[in-house]
Image: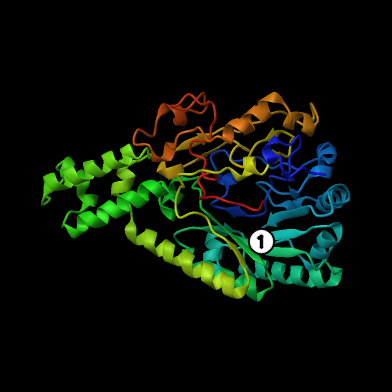
Amino acid sequence: MTDHRIPPMDRPWPSKLFVEVTTACNLRCAMCVKQSGPGIPDAYLSDETFEKLVPAFPTLETLILNGIGEPLLHPGLEHYIRTARQNVPVDAVIGFQTNGSLLTEQRACSLLSAGTDAISISVDAADPALFRSMREGGETEDVNRAAAALGRAKERTGRTGFRWGAELVLARETRAELPKVIEWVAARGGSFLIVTHILPYREEAVSSVVYDPNVDKTLAHYRKRKEEAAELGIDLSLYYTAKWRLGPVERREEIIACMERVVQEISDMGLPQHIPNLVSHDEGQYRETERLFRESSSLAQARGVDLRLPALGPRMDRRCDFIEEGSAFVSVSGTVHPCYFLWHSFTCHADGRIRPVDALSFGSVHDRPLLDIWNSPEFAAYRREIGTYPFPHCGNCSLAPCDYIERHEFEQDCLGNRLTCGSCPWSLGVLQCMR
């Protein structure tokens, strides 16, 4: 029996296990990490690898059977679910995310009969054209059919506790679709909607980002001071134009002096700041997103949909849900990782900058048992250190980009930490997933 007085990260077993059953996919979504650089080769979890995970099942609270690829492509998915159901606690949740294109009523019944508790369908827009633009090869007809199949399967199998919902990647082009997707979920009997911001893996996707790059507490102080300055006829967004004499500006010296006072105040408060990002802060977009989230929350509550929204921008008080909730991630090859961000190697454009990310593995289940890897001094020390959040806010540093985060072989950050988490978008609250 789990002792809930012990924090999940300190327990001698993972409480949540994310198992990547395949990296293959039948769609080519532009916002997927598979489209990053050289990409991630297609592979499938072997029965041998899965069997090596079973000894860790009796203490699990959650088992998520997906990673980068489409889990319904794996012919052994039901076998894995059935095996897990026989070995996890009775109240443990088994689920996965799918693009829905392969989900027929027959397959849905098979999945629910095997013991699936939750399924999330990727739905980024209700409009067919917008949906197609986000998910190459996908159609709204596919997700409509998938939702209907799950509803009928729930009735046929008598699995009254089964829940399904959707996940939406929020982009500038499709953000107005959020209320429509809430209505879509509610109308078809879904119970939840998980919303995440887009992480640009290609440079052209940077313009699709909706969230503000500035840390929430820093931005709150800047917005307050900018509004006060505006009442005096001083426009802080002209700071660089005034400072570097890039064009004619009235009250040049006052603009410079006012902005530099604000910068000093933020520094005295011990908050990180990226001055160019503050100066270029898009107040109109920020307020529009704020309004969208507020109205969407009200709509979801009225429709009975459990809505999980991301932060409006990076949060100062970081939290790694993966570490805090005692999670372990297993790749198709059997390597064990601490989180989603470090599951694969890729390149992204976080905060508009090129950011190479290297996968971090603590071993393979083909070399030693999963529980031995989890309890290894290296993995245990890593979790404890992450839990203190000692790393800098790389995305809100005026010195960035720097050699510490631009190099592929990460050695340490500017504070001497050997943790690669300074710019992790999950701990900053802008990305989230089914967990």
Rendered image quadrant of residue 340: top right
Above or below, comparing residue 126 to residue 219 in the picture: below
Q: Which one is nearer the viewer's eye here, 381 or 116?
A: 381
- In this image, 236 relative to 85: left or right? left
The type of residue carrying mark 1 is Ile
Could you tell me if residue 81 is visible in this image? yes
User: Which residue is depicted at the point 68% across and 55% down?
Assistant: 97
Residue 98 placement (x, y as % from top left): 69, 57
What is the number of callouts on the image? Answer: 1
Q: Which residue is mark 1?
A: 121
Q: Say which quadrant the N terminus sits in.
A: top right
User: Which residue is depicted at the point 69% across and 24% down?
Assistant: 377
Outermost residue, front direction?
5
Rendered image quadrant of residue 39: top right
The colour scheme used here is rainbow
Could you tell me if residue 126 is visible in this image? no
- In this image, 349 relative to 110: left or right? left
- In this image, 395 relative to 329: left or right? left
Residue 160 placement (x, y as % from top left): 80, 68
Residue 167 placement (x, y as % from top left): 61, 59
Label 1: state its secondary structure. strand
Above or below, comparing residue 141 to residue 205 in the picture: below
User: Which residue is depicted at the point 67% across and 48% down?
Assistant: 69
User: Which residue is depicted at the point 34% across and 61% down?
Assistant: 284
Q: Residues within 10 Å of mark 1 (few under 14, many from 20)?
A: many
Q: Which one is nearer the viewer's eye here, 176 or 146?
A: 176
Outermost residue, right direction?
86
Q: Which one is nearer the viewer's eye here, 31 or 221?
A: 221
Residue 34 placement (x, y as % from top left): 60, 45
